[in-house]
Structures are given as structure tokens and as C-alpha cells.
Amino acid sequence: MIGCKYSFCTKLTSISLPTTLITLGDNCFRFSGLTSIALPEGITALPYGCFASTKLTNIKLPKSLTEILSPANTNSFNIGYIYNTEYRNFQKSANFNYDQSGAFYSCTKLESIDFNGAALTSLGYAIFNECDMLRNVNLSTTKLETIPRYAFYSCDSLRTVTFPATVKTIEYQAFYNDQSLESLKMPAALSSIGDNAFGYCKKIRSIDFSATSLTKIDSWFSNVDSLRTVKLPSTVTEIGESAFRNSPIEEINFPASLTTIGNYAFSSNRLKTVDLSATKFTTINNWFANNNKLRTVKLPETVASLGEGAFDNCYIEEINFPAALTTIGARSLRYCRIDTLRLPATVTEIGQNAFYYAKFDCVEIPSTITKINSGAFYEAEIRGSLNITPNAALAWGDGGYTPFRCYGNEYITNEDGTSYNRYYHLPDVYWNSAAEFPRDKFGQIDNLYLPANGAVSSNNDIGYIFYNGLTKRIDIAYTNENRKYSFSVNKEMKTQMINYRKHFSTNSGYGEAAGWKTIVLPFDVKEISYERDGYNEKDTVALAPFGSKALETAGTLPFWLYELGTDGKYKAATEIKAHKAYLICMPNNEKYPSENNISGYVNFTTSDATNGVTLKPTAGALKRSKGTKFDFVPTYEGVMQHDTVYVLNENNYYNTDEKNYPAGSVFIKNYSEHYSNPAVYPFEAYLVTNEGKTSVASAPMLYSIGGGDGTITGIEDIPFATPEKATKAYSRNGVLYINTNADRTINIYDVTGRTVRIIEAREGMNEVHGLDSGIYLLEGQKVVIGR
């Protein structure tokens, strides 16, 4: 027997042992300078501490070895110590008995150990504790049943461990803080693992338990930062509380044998998919809360309840709702991102804050739901429609947040680094009941749809209310929420009246093109009127485009309306059709009679009090007018200035070295009249070139409305003049008679504004022959010629 006489022999680097040696004493080579050793056959046990804190780099064990011992008083073992091998010093803590360290404890130079077919059946705890250089351990030739606690604690270089098939138990912190351990395949006999057995093993990427007979998975992997894949055996019935909490696993199977999962077992990890469909769970609790990577969940058909916080703070995009489901628990689906939320007809209750801050395209609430608790959809974003068929006994939870206060804001950062707050609220709500709509349970709403006999206590913060799909009036306007400057109709709607109001104040041309604007509307316009300020009230004057039959109605004033023809030239239009771009100009010049000038708001209207007017979805409805040199492009979205976009100078003069262009006369490349805002707003239009230039730089700088191929003819000569009381005009049998009290030159215009005849009238009666049947304007008067 060799006792402890070599302990602390720091200069001892090697030793030859007699072949007759069969026993080593406790701590026999502890703190020696030993670097290698071969143990003779016949030794059956290594006592505790025999090689503790040596500089062994390798050791060959005899085949006769069956036991590596642990301290006698195992309950007093405490790992609280500070030790540094390199400087040969050791500081013990108040609770540490160094006689109880493991056989190879802190052999910081030990790189390999050859079990050499040893018939090992037992290892002492902390046997290789803090063997910093130990890289690989092959235990496959042994007959071990237990890997004791702290066996490989803080073995920083350990990468692989090969277990014998006989291992049944891995004890508490057996591999704790092994910084290089990458993968483990567990033996089939394994049935028990201690807490934190693999805690802080930061490089383990996968663990395969599939061949084992484990029945419970517990918190063995705390702070394993690299763990991605776990394979569970078909024998597992329970996963313990917080078992994989804060673990970055991405893939794990849930066998049919599983019956119990502890609180927050999978909280805060990287699972993207959870498939529980093979199990028989009836309630899903907070097992997966706070997984912001989770996107897909498959539930078994046996689930009747989503418990409190089941998928709280998970960004779930796809989840099945089993036919057995009756309860959506509090906070169970907060922050989810489900396109269409269609709850099954078995659900009876939605819990408090169940869908708080979630996002949906559409939500459908069935009539089976008898209770909706406070904050159920608080600050949720429903981009499309909310469809509710309320139960006659529907109750609302007490206190807390408004259940459908579905408005809020989201801070958005663009790719270019700019950021803004994006605001949202409810667009469309369908309340499918004659029961009074509970206004206090909802936030801001764009459109509320009620049955014909429906009722609402207040229309506060409701844009339009539709009864049986029909509302009284819609005023078309774009929104500038979220700096998008957009207009859209997402779902077909009907109204008794649709109106768009546009302001005109720019001077129109006299002898030149000026005062033009662009216009595009989502409905066919039937009536156009001008709000003229009168004495303390507004009188309304009917308007119509030149060439329109509406000008035959007394008191109707004309204006110019043009569209782009396929020949690349503008041509007169007599009506405004939906989703098409037009040029429009209102007479406004000091040379015109004041009663013919239009400066102020103009209303574009369509109405049908009986059947209603249908406003159809705008997606894909806009019609681009194609020309030879350029296209005329309508928009319902704000368009920023760009080299490919030609914008009309609607309000400001545009100067070049050659010419000064009046407002509303020219489309200019990369032009804007608005600082930082869109160059083109919704309900306006712009040009894009078709000239086939090889680069943007070679494209024309501008396209003029008047002149060149884009000339609009016949608008410089305005069909208005100051009416002379002494000049009277009328017609009989196709002849135009003009009676004037003095010689004068008189222009005769048709309703398009084109000059058709110029006559030198003499004092007295004048006859004009050869005019076609139609309406003519002269000297501020309108004359109808018929045959």
C-alpha cells in the first residue's frame, strides 16, 4: 500500500510502482508534481483524492479496476473553494473539507484517460472536477450505472463523452459548466437525470434521449446557450417546471405519452413550431409564454381550454382551434399575428386581455360566446373587418380596459433609418343583431354595419353607419396617417350619396394654357356644383364640362375637362368616370364676366336615394391613360418626387432660362411644390415618359399642356363676354338672329368652347345662316338652334 507520503511532493513528476501493488491510500499523490503514471494490474480501487490537483497529462488504468471511490461523508461535500494550480496555492472556504475532493479533482493538465477495459462499476463524485484540459472521455468499456454528481464539473475542454449502455443515472451537476461539450447521445438504460446536470454547458447543440426510458425531463439544461435540438423518448410523461426556460432550443418533439408539462417549461426559447397534436392535453397552460420566435402551433383535438398566459407574448401566425375548445383564457394569445381569427362555435368565453396587442386581417366572433372580458382585444390591430354575431345573453367583463378599443400606434423604423409612429384603428365593424350596438365597448371605427332595424346609442368616433349595407352619405377624403397619404376602399359599400370636394383658385389662361389641375375619383360623377359665397349664405351653382348636355340647363356654368387620347393628345371629355385621370380647369380670369368665374370649393357628387350608389374596392382599379410620348397616371397614394415622375405645377409658376410657365400649365420631371411631403397627392395624376430614352437624364425636362403635341386647342378664346343689354339673340327655323344697337365684332362658340363663327355685326338686325343644330354661346347668352 502507498499512503499519503507523496502528498504535496511538488517536485515528484514520475514514479514506478511495483507490480505487486494492490492498494493506494487516500490522497496519496494529492498536490504532487506527477505528470504521468501507469497503475499495475491488481489495483481494484482508487481512493478519494489520490490524484487531486496534480499535473497529470495521461493515466492508464488497470483492467482490474472496479471502483473509483468518493469521500465517506458525502453529505458534507461543498464545492465552495478557490484554487489555482499554476501558482501552487489553495484557499479553502469555511465550508470546504479538502479531504473530500474527487480522485482526479483539479488535475488541470490531464488531457486523456484510458479506461483500458476496466471493469468499473462505480465512480466517486467530483472525480474529474475541474480537469480543465480533459478533452474526451470514453466510458463505453465500463459497467457503470451512475455518473455521480460533479463528476465532470467545469471540465472546460471536454467535448465528447461516450457512455456505456449500463448507465441508468446522471446525478446533480455531473457535467455542469463544461464549456466545450458539444453533443451527447444518451444510453438506452438511462432513467434518471439530476437537476442542472448540464447547466451552463454553452456549446451543446443537440441531445438525443430517444433511445432512453426516461419518464420525466427536468431542468437539466439551464443556461445552455447553444442548445438547438432535443429528441425525447416515447416513454416521457412529464416535462418539469422551467425545464427548457431561457434555453434557445429550436426543435423538440412531443410524444403521445406526454401528460404533464410544468409552468414556463418552454418560456423564452427559440421554438418556431410546437406540435402537440399527438398528445391528449385538454388544457394548455403557460408552458410556451414569451417565445417571440414561435409562429406555428398544432393543438390536439382534445383541448378544451387555452389557460391563462398559454401563448402570452408569442407572435403566433398559425394555430388550430380544436372543435372541443370552449375557453380562450386571459392573456392566452397576446401579441399573436393571425391573418383570420375564426373562433369555433364551441367557444363561450374570451378572457381578459386574451388578444391584447394582437394583429389580424379579419376577426369573426360567433354567437356562442356569452362573455367577453375586459381588454379582450385591447389595442389589437384588425386591418380588415370585425364581424360579431352577438349572443342574446352576451355579457361584458367588469372593469379593466375596453374590450374592443382597437386603436393605438406602433413605432416603425424604415430601411433608410428614418422612423415614425404608425397609427391604426378599426376600419369595419359588422354588428349582426338588432340589439343596440354597445358603443362604449369599442374604440374609433371607420364604418359600422348594422341591420336595417339596428340601433346605436352614439355615433361618436364612427365615420359612417350603414343600415342594411346602406349609409346616407360618404365624403371621399384621403388620410395622412402614418405619413402614407392614401385612400382605399377595402370592401364594397353602398351609400345614398358620394361626394368629393376640391378647391379651385388658380388663375385660368386667357390666350395661353394655365389654371389646370388633375383629378381622379373612385366613382362616376353625376352632378358637379360650385359653392359660391352670397350674402351671408352660400348659393350653389351647377357646373358641367364644355360639350355636356347638362349645359342646356339654364344657369349651368361651363368648365374645361380633358382626357389623354391614344394619339398622345388631350381631347375634350364630357364626364368624369371612376378611376381615370383627367385634366380640369375652372374659368377664373379678370377678363371674364365675374358671374362666370369659379374660385372656391367645387363638389363632385353621385346620388341615388332609393337603391344607393355602390363604391367598389379600389385595389387594382386605377386606369392609366396610355399615350405615345407619355402615360397619364392616376393615384390614390401619395407619390414622392422622382426622376421618372412628371408633376403638374398646379399652384406655382415654373421658371426656366427660356420661359416662365404659369401655374397649371406644365408637367415637370422630378418636381414638387411640397417640402418633404408627396409631390402628388391622392385623387391627382402625373405623367411618366414613353419616349424610350436610354437614361433618365436624357428624358425631356417637361411636357407642356399648351403647345407641341400636347396642345389643348380652343381654350384660349373664352366663350364669355360682358353681356350687352342692347344685344339680343334668338333663332327661328335654323337661322340665328342678332339684334344690336351698334356695330360690333361678335364671336359665336359651341359648348366645347370652340369658336365656330366670327361675324361683323351691324347696328340693327343681323342674320347668321348655316349653323348646325345645337347650343351656341355669344355675348353671355345661350341660344338653341333647331330645324
Image (cartoon, rainbow, N blue to C red):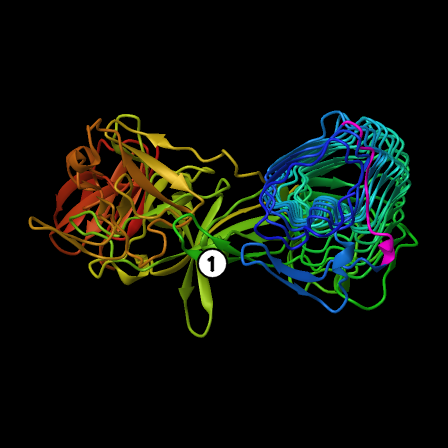
Asked whether 586 or 3 is in front, the reply is 3
One can see residue 57 in this view: yes
Tell me which residue sits at (47%, 38%) in the image: 578
Start-end of magenta stretch: 63-75
Spot occupied by residue 473 in the image (x, y as percentages of width and height)? 60, 53
Q: Is residue 74 magenta?
A: yes
Horizontal side of residue 60 vs 712, given as left or right: right
Asked whether 36 or 569 is in front, the reply is 36
Q: Is residue 503 above or below residue 36?
A: below
Q: Which residue is mark 1?
A: 420
Spot occupied by residue 374 in the image (x, y as percentages of width and height)? 80, 61
Horizontal side of residue 388 vs 291, given as left or right: right
Tell me which residue sits at (56%, 38%) in the image: 617
Q: Residue furthest bottom?
A: 536
Q: Secondary structure at mark 1?
A: strand
Asked whether 472 or 238 is in front, the reply is 238
Which quadrant of the rendered structure holds the C terminus?
top left
User: Which image quadrant is residue 68 in?
Assistant: top right
User: Which image quadrant is residue 280 in?
Assistant: top right
Horizontal side of residue 611 vs 24, given as left or right: left
Spot occupied by residue 210 in the image (x, y as percentages of width and height)? 79, 28
Asked whether 310 or 668 is in front, the reply is 310
One can see residue 480 in this view: no
Tell me which residue sits at (45%, 52%) in the image: 485
Q: Amino acid at mark 1?
A: Tyr
Q: Is residue 377 magenta?
A: no
Q: Main secondary structure of the magenta part?
A: loop
Spot occupied by residue 303 in the image (x, y as percentages of width and height)? 88, 39
In this rendering, the count of numbered labels is 1
